[in-house]
Image (cartoon, helix red, strand yellow):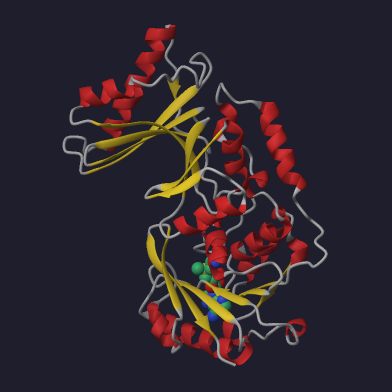
Amino acid sequence: MAKFLALTSRGLLDVLESEFKELGFKRFHKTPHGVSFEGSWAECYRANLELRTATRVVLPLLDFTAYRPEELYQQIRRHDYTKYIDPASQTLAVEASVRDCGEFRDQRFVAMKVKDAVVDQFRDQLGLRPSVNTDSPDLRLMIRGVKHEFSLSLDTSGPALSFRGYRREGASAPLREHLAAGLLKMTGWTPDKPLVDLMCGSGTWLIEAALMAQKTPPGSLRQGFAFERLKNFDPDVWSEVLSHSLEQEDTEPTRPPQLYGFDLASEAISASRANARRAGVEEFIRFQRSAVDQVQLPEELKAAPPGVVVVNPPYGQRLGESHELDDLYQDLAYTLKREFAGWSCYLLSGDAERTQALKLKATRRFPVHNGAIECRFLEYKINR
Ligand SMILES: C[S@@+](CC[C@H](N)C(=O)[O-])C[C@H]1O[C@@H](n2cnc3c(N)ncnc32)[C@H](O)[C@@H]1O
C-alpha cells in the first residue's frame, strides 16, 4: 500500500474528487494540492489510465523543512532511491519549483542539490551513479518548496496526462484535454444530451465528450507512462488493469452521442476531423465550417430536448484584436437566442469584461486556469 496524489489545474479539484468517486476508488480525499489516494501500485496504474481530469499522478516521498543547502541535501538522502532504477542503464531528472525560500532562490540550484544527494546515494550504495536525462528520464523527481517547507515526489505519469496522443493537429489556442474534460463534467452534460461547440478549434471538447460516451480510458490512447520504467513495474498487473478497463469500453453505443462542432476556420475543421479520427471517434462527431452568426440548429435536433452548447472564443491576449471580439460576442449572443432557446450555454472566457457584450446574465461562474490565463467558465440559460 502507498499514498499517491493526483494533481490537476486550479479550479478542477472538485471535479477531480468526484471523478475518483465515479471510478469507484475507495480511500481518497481532497487536499489543497490535489486528491490524495491510498492503494497498491495497481491503483496508481488505474488512476493514470482512467482519470480524465488529472494532469499527473505522483508518489509523495518526503516532506521536510530546510533553510540551508546542506540540510536539503541530508533530508533528501533519508529516502532510498536505489529501488526505483538501475544506475547502469537508467537515467534520472529533477524538476524544482521554489517560492519564498530565502537563499534557495534559484530553482536550478535546488534541482542540482537534490540530484547530487540522489546520485551520491547510488554511488555510496552501489558504486555507480545514474546519468541525468532531462528529456526522457526513467526516474523523474519533483521538488516543491514554499517558505522553506519542501516536498519531494516521484512522477508516475511522464508527459502530463492531458497529452492523450490524439491531438497532433492544433488550431490556435487549444484547450488542454484534461481541462476540456473537466469543464464538460462541470456542465453536467451526459452522453444522452446533444452537445454543440460553436468554435470548436481542434475539436477537443467534442472528442473528449465522445471518449466519455464510449467509456474509453483516456490513457489507453497514449504511448506509455513513467511507472512502466521503474524497477518495481509489474507488467502482469498492468496488463490486468488495462484489459479490465478496456472491457468497460463501448465503441458501438446503442444510442450514439449527438456531437456537433462548428468553426469559421477551415484548417480548424480539418484538424478537428484528423484529431477525432486518431481518437477513434470520428463517426460520432459532425464538423461543419461556419461563422458563428451563420450557425443553425441541426435539423435532427429541432424536435429533441435541449442540450448543452459550449464555446471558447478567441482571447484578446492570445488571438485577434480586442475590438473585433465585441462583435464576435454579439454574433454569439444572436445565434444563441435565435437557435438555442431552452439550451444551457457554457462559455470559457479569458476576458471577463468582453462577456458584457453578450448582454446575457450568467447564472453560474467558475474560476479556472487555462494554462497561465485566469479564466471564467460561465453558465447561461438561454430563454425560450
Ligand atoms: C480559442 S479557439 C478554440 C479552441 C478549442 N476550444 C480547442 O480546444 O481547440 C477559438 C476558435 O474560434 C474560432 N473563431 C474565431 N472567430 C470565429 C467566428 N466568427 N465564428 C466561428 N468561429 C470563430 C477560431 O477559428 C478558433 O478555432
Which residue is located at x 35 percent, y 79 percent? 353
From the top left corner, tell me how far across and down residue 18 is, in percent.
54, 56
Which residue is located at x 51 percent, y 45 percent? 160
Task: Determine whether, in the image, residue 320 is placed left or right of residue 69.
Answer: right
Which residue is located at x 38 percent, y 18 percent? 119
Work out which residue is located at the far top of the displayed protein and give it.
127
Asked whether 304 or 350 is in front, the reply is 304
Q: How many marks?
A: 0
Asked whether 186 or 295 is in front, the reply is 186
Asked whether 317 or 259 is in front, the reply is 259
Q: Is residue 211 visible?
A: yes
Q: Is residue 313 visible?
A: no
Image height of 89 relative to 6, above or below: above
Residue 320 in which image quadrant: bottom left
Where is the C terminus found, in terms of image quarters? bottom right
Asked whether 284 or 381 is in front, the reply is 381
